[in-house]
Amino acid sequence: MSLPNISRVSASGLLRSSCDLRWLLRSVAPLAAPRRALTHMGYRRPGQPREDRPPWWRVKFDLAKGLKGMKRHFKLLKEEFFAPFVGPMGKPIIEHMLEQNQVLWEFRGPHSLQEWTISCDREIGGKSEIYLKVGRNNESCLLYGTLCSDPPKDGETRYSGYCTMRSKQPLASFDRKKYHDWSSFNTLHLRVRGDGRPWMINIVPETYYTHQKDDMYSYFLYTRGGPYWQDVKIPFSKFFLAHRGRIQDDQHPVWLDKINSIGFTLGDKADGPFQLEIDFIGVCKDYAHTEDFAYEKYKRNPEV
Amino acid sequence: MAPPIYSALIISLGLGTTMTFASTHWYLAWMGIEINTLAIIPLMAQNHIPRAIEATTKYFFVQATASATLLFAGISNAFLTGQWDITYTPYTLTSTLITLALAMKIGLAPLHSWMPEVMQGLNLLTGLILSTWQKLAPLYLIYQIQPNNPNIFIALGLLSIIVGGWGGFNQVQLRKILAYSSIAHLGWMILILSFSPPLALLTIIIYILMTFSLFSSFMLTRTTHINSLSTTWAKIPILTVSTPLILLSLGGLPPLTGFMPKWMILQELTKQSLCPLATMAALSSLFSLYFYLRLSYAMTLTMPPNNPAGTLPWRLNPRHNTLPLALTTTSTICLLPMTPAIMSLMPF
């Protein structure tokens, strides 16, 4: 294959043709590389379909949908404006101060599943499956599926086998990020019915630096397999810091004033079906629990 | 932090402010401010937790931007006037730029957005240094520049009073409340600066006394949230009596000390035939008073929802030095009758 002839252009010629940059680009574009979509950023996994459509083809322009969206956002903005007149976070101060328990997510119908998203290793080429549906009598939600630890055969992934359910980021008007403020509470309270598998609860707070975006605070949820419901109370002081699943040496307690999401992950390398039923997820203030942090803070450079 | 390093940083903090106080040249004043900024950065970041590092980074960016603007304005002033004297700023452009840079340094509205987030990420001691000591050098420079047109000071001051009150309206985190309180009080100070600089000095001194006593109270009780205020009575009962008085003093209620600067400022504004401005400032401070009252209510008039006798932690530390708190609390509560004496000492 011969290389294309790159014609030399004089300076005056460049000035004349400065408006027509396509001419200039055409001469230096590689011949053998396939044409990639303009918005295809990053690595494409083998087996994933190639996305070659330009972005304006993927957006569905709909006036009715746009008007509905604007109406929703302005309604949220109005609520946000008038909420401070009631009290912090829209609740009277006395209610805010006296509350000891707050139910954050209560699964009582299909609408409650919209705040959650599920994911498994199928995204990286694995074979696990995960589904989320409303439980019996609309009294709970059921997270179920099949775990498979076989790594995808793409030559680069060595480990696989995870399923996760995560709450979506709360959004204020005009899709601005909003955070959960759990600083009045010190314990996570769940009512679950599992199948005996050990799950991991992950809390993802708001971070500032890009290298902190995979930081999460995790703890274990050991489920009993029986037909009875299980009340689990985990103090926030027990949550330890992990980055991309790796536990960090420099530990500190989780700051509860800006929480983005909470999630449940299963990755116990036991292939087979699983299920987890959740009644509610809430937070509570346990005055008897006075521990600030459960782990010794590791000093990497101890003073001698 | 190792004691020698800690001492060096504290001494640098003092050195920076003192250098600015002693300077008449823009370069030296700017250098003092930079030393101040750089000395507090390690103090803010000494806890290696993400929120503290985030607060430090945000603080650094804001202060560096303001310092660069200040230096540019100083150099422009020197270029236009031919001299580096701080007090000689005849051109509106340079004096406005200097004012805005210094306003950003101290967190006046509309350049205040960084302050609550930075305060929230720090511990109470560092927050105290940020609210009090770090304001002195920029305020001194604002005091010196004496712009021709006081309208910018009036605009900054009034906006800060309104924003400081409105912003703290919905807060439950004590450090953010203190940040908004700082913004509001600096607004009062800036408002009167062009009319009566000694009154501005009085305001900042009384503000430092009140803020120091409030921060010290919160440090003793280890409270950073409004909910934990309700359990103060079981920790240190005397603070449950004195802290609401400090809060009401911050709100400017007579017969407490905090009423003194507000009273004098309103009187001065009235003498300058600025009654609408005085009315607006007084009405805007009602927002601040509301959240101070809310804190007082949470501390003294609410009981936690369970019996705290056997379950609350006793955090009494017998080695903690409470003398500064005692002195500043007494000053915060009892100095109003000495107003005539203080006014006679003021160099009007």
Image: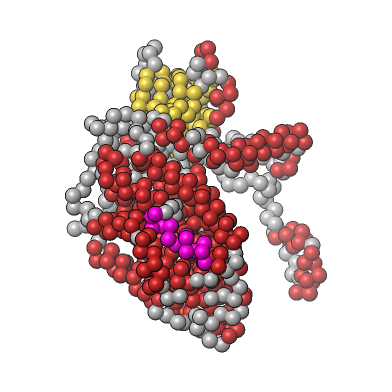
Seen in the image, is B42 located left or right of residue A144?
left
The foreground one among A161 and B299 is: B299
Q: Residue at x 58, y 46 (%)?
A: A42
Q: Nearer the viewer, residue B91 or B189?
A: B189
Residue that appears at 55% across and 40% down: A85
State the predominant SS element of the stretch in magenta: helix
Magenta-span inclusion, residue A113: no
Which x, y percent locates residue B57?
Answer: 45, 58
Q: Position of residue B312 (x, y in %)?
A: 26, 35
Query: Where A90 sits versus B37, above or below?
Result: above
Asked whether, in this view, residue A276 is left or right of residue B319, the answer is: right
Residue A39 point in image, percent of width and height? 66, 46
* Depth order, front residue of A61/A269: A61
Res. B258 image quadrant:
bottom left
Q: Can residue B81 be seen in this snapshot?
A: yes
> Picture coordinates of residue B212 (x, y %)?
34, 58
Residue at left 70%, top 57%?
A: A29
Where does the magenta region start and end? B255-268
Please tell me whether residue B77 is drawn above or below residue B263 in the rendered image. Answer: below
Query: Is residue B262 within the magenta segment?
Result: yes
